Amino acid sequence: MQLRLYDTLTKEKRPFTPLDPANVRMYVCGPTVYDFAHIGNARPVIVFDVLFRLLRHLYGDKHVTYVRNVTDVDDKINDRAARDFPGLPLNEAIRKVTELTEKQFHDDVDALGALRPTVEPRATEHIAEMREIIERLVQGGFAYVAEDHVLFSPQAMNAANSVLPRYGALANRSLDEMIAGARVDVAPYKRDSTDFVLWKPAKPGEPSWPSPSGISVPGRPGWHIECSAMAWKHLGEQFDIHGGGIDLVFPHHENELAQSACAFHSDRMANVWMHNGFLQVESEKMSKSLGNFITIRESLADWPGEVLRLNMLKTHYRSPIDWTSKALEESAKTLDDWYEVAADAKAERPSDAVIDALSDDLNTPQMIAALHGLRNVAASGSERGRGEFAATLRLLGFLSESAAAWKGRKQQASGIDAKQIDDLISNRTAARARKDFKESDRIRDELAAMGVVIKDSREGTTWEIAR
RNA sequence: GGCCACGUGGCGGAGUGGUUACGCAACGGUCUGCAAAACCGUGCACUCGGGUUCGAUUCCCGACGUGGCCUCCA
């Protein structure tokens, strides 16, 4: 089945044709590194990891370039640096914060089973490209200098009659609407309220770089220009897919698109714009004030990364997802079963049914339904079925450990002494053999009270930790 | 206020103009000393009101409800 993807810009699902099948190119907006990533941040990481894996499967591992940036220049980073390392010069403190946070982020998303992107560029290493784009925009009449700022003018963009897209096309709103609905105080140096910052002067002590366009004081880039620059450097003037959270559509992606299209005189930046929906926690918006703010790190303390991963994929990426412990328990149970059925099977080819489901705009619920089907074939005793099931799970970033390790993880977390359990079970087996069912049931209850569930079969009695 | 998305069985969640989603839970059965697990099977649905149609959960209009964006945000 041909891959089809939904494009936010054209609001349609359409067949995906790479600009260059030998190098399929995707850019996804990555984290701003100032604190632990939260569970909402995990959604694009997982969703676009699945897409990355699908593209690698379809076009070959060596023919897909996935770029996910690291934003390491930002007010929040500066604030955090000053707070956490008050004794250090700000620049050093900032480096500490960004390095530490980036490592935390990597540890977290690795645990979620996400492959590392092909390139993870840092904003601060692409200042030259940003300046270059800004210079081009000023020369082209799309941006202007005012009070040591460089500002982009959407009005100028829309006035230029050329191949350029219309500013506002991605977010589906007109400049008039934006002007009418503006709720922000307009900075005095802006010609129009819709103008946005490409470059601004740095405050004393902040990280800064020589400014473009003849500005004498040092400055720092605006947020939107960073992604235009990094995408350009690593993927070229045009590429295939640009992704991120739905909240980035406006203004971030709208502005990126405007910057890149105007700088390169192009009708587009990416062929497909993809956006994942938001996440709520137990039916409430996640926020620090509600006290339901969950970091990936905290979730990983309670659940294996694969449980979080499966849970995230139970809902289609464009729909909102309600993150609940009930759903997580269900996901955990499903994976327990899948590990039991599939683990340690010899890998065969991944399933076409699963690839087809993903090819339909990443229909992961359909993919999971297909996995349940594969599971049943595998459980019926078909060794080939087991191999196909296992290969498919591995392709999707599951089944990264052995069945024994998976089970042991739960046991370890419970802190239960396996030897003690085994002893109790032999006592129970002995009681059953002499038909002392009162005693055997008593032992069973004792085990249950400890959180241990036993399973009797012809081969003997096994046990596991109840959830 | 402006723009947008969504509303499916007890719960989660796909999809479709007429035919089984899938999973969890529930219920019945097999197995078991009894259970659990496993396996087999069963039931339950498309917010409301109009319209289009031979026929709508699926298309159109409206109402109500939920969520998002418009400001940093995945």
Image (cartoon, helix red, strand yellow):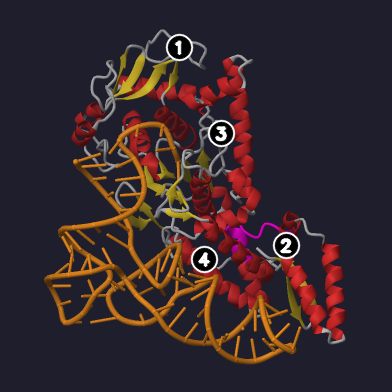
Question: To which residue does mark 1 refer?
Answer: A218
Q: Residues within 10 Å of mark 2 (few under 14, many from 20)?
A: some
User: Tag 4's secondary structure?
Assistant: helix
Badges 1 and 3, same chain: yes
Q: Which region of the structure is painted magenta? A: A390-406
Q: How crowded is mark 3: few (under 14 residues within 10 Å), some or many (20 or more)?
A: some
Q: Which of marks 2 and 4 is nearer the N terminus?
A: 4
Q: Which of marks 1 and 3 is in front?
A: 3
**Is residue A74 visible from the viewing direction of this image?**
no
**Nearest to the observer: residue A162 or residue A374:** A374
Cα gap from disc 3 to disc 2, whole angstroms: 32 Å
Magenta segment includes A391 = yes
User: Tag 3's secondary structure?
Assistant: loop
Question: To which residue does mark 3 refer?
Answer: A35
* A125 horizontally vs A301: left or right: left
Horizontal and vertical percent for residue A209?
49, 15
Magenta segment includes A464 = no
Q: Earlier in the sequence, mark 2 or mark 1?
A: 1
* A181 horizontally vs A32: left or right: left
C-beta proximity under 8 Å, tags 2 and 1 = no
User: Tag 2's secondary structure?
Assistant: helix
Q: Which chain carries label 2?
A: A
Q: Which chain carries label 3?
A: A
User: Residue at coordinates 85% horizontally, 81% vertically from top-left?
Assistant: A431
Question: To which residue does mark 2 refer?
Answer: A407
User: Residue at coordinates 75% horizontally, 81% vertically from top-left?
Assistant: A457
User: Residue at coordinates 22% horizontally, 34% vertically from top-left?
Assistant: A181
Question: To which residue does mark 4 refer?
Answer: A368
Cα gap from disc 2 to disc 4, whole angstroms: 22 Å
Q: Earlier in the sequence, mark 4 or mark 3?
A: 3
